[in-house]
Each structure stands twice: as structure tokens, then as C-alpha cells.
Amino acid sequence: MSRVTRIKGVADIFPPDSALFTSMEAAARVVFSRFGFRELRTPLLEFSELYARSIGAETDVVQKEMYVFDGGKGRSFALRPEATAGVMRAYIDAGLGAKESVSRLFTLGPMFRHERPQLGRMRQFHQINCECLGSGSPVADAEMIVMLLQFLREIGINGLTLKLNSLGCADCRPRYRAALGAFLASLDADALCPDCARRAGTNPLRVLDCKVSACRELTLNAPSLADAQCSVCKSHFAAVLDFLRARSIDYELDHRLVRGLDYYCRTTFELVSGAIGAQSAVAGGGRYDGLVRNLGGPDVPGVGFACGMERLALLMGKPDAPVPDFFIVAACADAQKQAFSLAQELRDANFHGTVAFSVVSLKSLMRQAHKSGARWCLIVGQNGADAPAVTIKNMTDGSQTSAPMSEIFSLFSHKREFEHASTQR
RNA sequence: GCGGAAGUAGCUCAGUUGGUAGAGCACCUGGUUGUGGCCCAGGCGGCCGUGGGUUCAAGUCCCAUCUUUCGCCCCA
């Protein structure tokens, strides 16, 4: 019989990693709610158009990486490749803009992109996402970054590099884009790498963060994005930096930090790690002031970020496996029913533990008990058939005591006394 | 879409210029033992990813193909 297989790029998350994901989600809920953020759960499925209009029809994410399929009635559906667009759609749908001046929302869950999988990059991956809609204030930008760092601290991740840049706004960025395009066109035709030669026409800003050293040298003399910005953008960015310095937050200005999603403007930021392989960006975000209006909603500004849970998990310490309170073995097949019932009584009293299923030798069962890591092993029905007795063995020091079945529950419930009594023997 | 590496026991991997398929862990049985742990012995377990080719003979050499993985690209 052929074996069923897993789709490439999707993962089964087993312990201990599943515990990492659970604790990440718990920490996100705790920290973000301190900042007044509420959890929003959006669908995994949206009309493809949503992403073309928000992320950008020409971006790699939309053109090459999105899972698109026929939704019937001539509509095209897509599995969400990121969360921001869906949150904007939900915000508009619910008319939140008319109900509150500022909306603070977070969402988390799986995203889907058809890429070649590698370390820290899956086709189904998981993100934690925060969006603050309704304020253009630099305080909102700074608060996002502060909140992100506090969340990371909460899950034990420190020492990431915060990179910052400003992309300008709808007024000044097109001017810069044109100037940069003209500069790139003035270079030798084959001076840039093939990718950049293509990008120079489609998205010249992306040439700035090409990793090929030749391209980087050529663009050293390119017009400066910072200089080209209007005074409003400049003072906005200066204010953001000011707030960060007020909290002694270290950052690096990186004028090559150009986000690949078209909707970003003004502040963009990224947190990178040198310890998790090639996919070093752990979190990224920025401001997207025109986005809601472009999707047919009110003209509200917004700022947000996303962080990749798989990449965070690579940076987190592995948690200790939970230690069960007890492990029960039946000394003979006749005792299985009593072992089964005793285990359930203990679980009703909030102990946690397991029963050995197998009917192999007692020696083998005891080996399993040791492997389980349980502090106590209860051996049922060992002392003859007449009186159902239970031997309680302390797995740490090997001491043991026997008692009738009827007394075991109270004995075990008062574990402290029992522990004390067992050391007396 | 493009590169590099790797597919052998349930798991981690050895396998010499081609010559009968190996170890450790895990599992089972027995022995030993005042921690039924540890330790010792034995047992169970393999279409050597798949399909072709060369050869008296292929895990080993050649070709194809699939899968996994690390990169490029892109992104979190």
C-alpha cells in the first residue's frame, strides 16, 4: 500500500515546537491587549483582487507566489499570502472607521505563498500581525515598534537589529522614483545584475536592496531617498526617531530598506537576526497611509507590522516537556480494569498521567514508566489475587510502599504526606 | 523558475578499487541487580527512493525520474 504524503512546504508542528507556537500566541494576546489591541480573525480565503489592489499587481507575491483558484461564477479566490489586506477589507466591511477614530487590531494564523521552501520559509507559514488604523501621528509608528519589541522580550527574544527607513509619501515618492529610474537608465546596460536590470524598469526602488555587491556599489551614487522627501515626510520620520530615542531604543538607519509590498509609505522597519540562516528578517512593517482608500474605504492612515512565527521559533529556547504526575501499570491482565479506573479518579482530581496499554512483561512496563518521566509509578494488582493492592513506587529514589486499592486515592491526593511517609521507610 | 547537497532497519547514520546487508538508539525476550532504572546476552526488523543501463556480479559505476534539504530570487 502506498503511503500518503505531505504537501511540499507545509509542516506538521509537533512538540516541543507546538508549545512554542502556543506560548507565542499567548504572549501576543497578553502584550497587545496592554496596548489596547483587540483580536480580529479574518478568513483564509479572499477574492484575489484584494491582494492585487493592496500588495500590488506587479509584486512577486501576487504574480508568482499566490495560491489562486477558481471560485466559481467567474470570481478568482486566493489563499491569503499576508494578513494586512484582509484586515483592511474587514475594517471597511464593518464600517469601523465610522464607529471609532482609531482601530487597534491584531490577527494571527497561517498564510500561504508558493515559494521554494528553505530554513525559515514554508509555503504555509504563520504570522502575528498588528494594525493601527486612523492615526497619522508618528506616535503610532513609535508605539508599534515599542509594542513589537515588548512582545519579543516577553517570549525571550532579544538582540535583534532594528532597521529603519522612510520611503516618502504619495507626493514625494513618485518624484524620487522617477529620478532613480533616470539614474539607473544612465548606467551601462550590463552593469547591473540581470535581476536589477529588470527591476530598474518595474520597481526601481528594489534595486537599492539588491544583495549583489556590484549593484550595491553602483547605487552608492544614486540619488538619496532621504534627500528627495518632502518636508512633511522628513519631520514625520524625525519625530518617530525622537520617540524611539526617548525610550533608548537602538536602531540602524538603512536607506536600502525597501519593502516589497507596494502599500508602504513613510516609516518602514525590519527586525533582523544573524542566527537563523538566510531568511533573516524576523519581523517587518511600516506605514501605509493610502491603502484603505485604495480599497474603496475611507481615507484613513495606518501603520502595522507582521512577524513570522516559524522564524521566531528558531530563536526561542526549547521548552521543557511537561512531567506527568503518575504512570500506571497493571501487573496482570486481570488488573487492567482497576488500573484504568484508578487513573481516571486521579485525573478527576487534576493529576495528570497515563496508563500503560501493553500486555508485555512487568519489567518492560517498568522501563516504559521510567521513560515517561513520571514521578510516581502505580503498579496495580501485584500482591496476589485476593486483595487488590497497589504498589506506589517513587521513581526518583526507588522507594516503594503498598496499600489496598481503597486507600490509594487518598494517599496519592495527599502527595506531600505520602512523600514524607515514603522517605521515612 | 535556477543552483548545491542528500535519499540504506521505525530513528541517526556507516558501507573500502563493484563480490552474501552493518552499527548505535528504539522495541520484544531472557539474565543480573534492593532504584523492576543501569548493565549483559539474544531476538525483531531492509525492493539500499523509483525506473532503466553497464557487468559473471551493482547499495557502490552511468542515465533518467521522484522526494527531502540548504541557498538564489522573494518575503516575515
Image: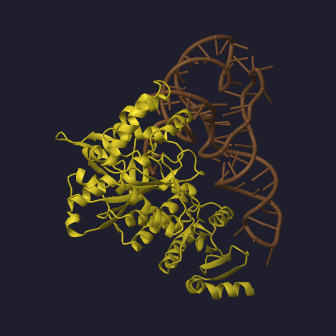
Chain colours: A yellow, B brown
What residue is shown at x 56% (from left), y 53% (from top)?
Answer: A273
The residue closer to the viewer here, A153 or A250, is A250
- Figure quadrant of residue A385: bottom right
Q: Is residue A193 left or right of residue B40?
A: left
Foreground of the two, B59 or A46: A46
Q: Quadrant of the C terminus of chain A?
A: bottom right
Residue A150, x across and y down, in percent: 49, 68
At 24% across and 50% down in the image, what residue appears? A294
In percent of width and height, residue A349 lies at 50, 81
In-image side of B15 versus B50 (left or right) = right
Figure check: A176 above or below A423: above
Residue A70: give x, y in percent of width and height.
Answer: 24, 39
Q: Is residue A396 above or below residue A42?
A: below
**Point 26% across, 47% down: residue:** A50
Tell me if residue A347 can be seen. Answer: yes
Q: Can you name the residue that lies furthest to the left here?
A: A73
Number of marks: 0
Q: Residue at x 28, y 40 (%)?
A: A69
Q: Is residue A137 above or below residue A277?
A: below
The answer to which of A128 and B11 lies nearer the viewer is A128
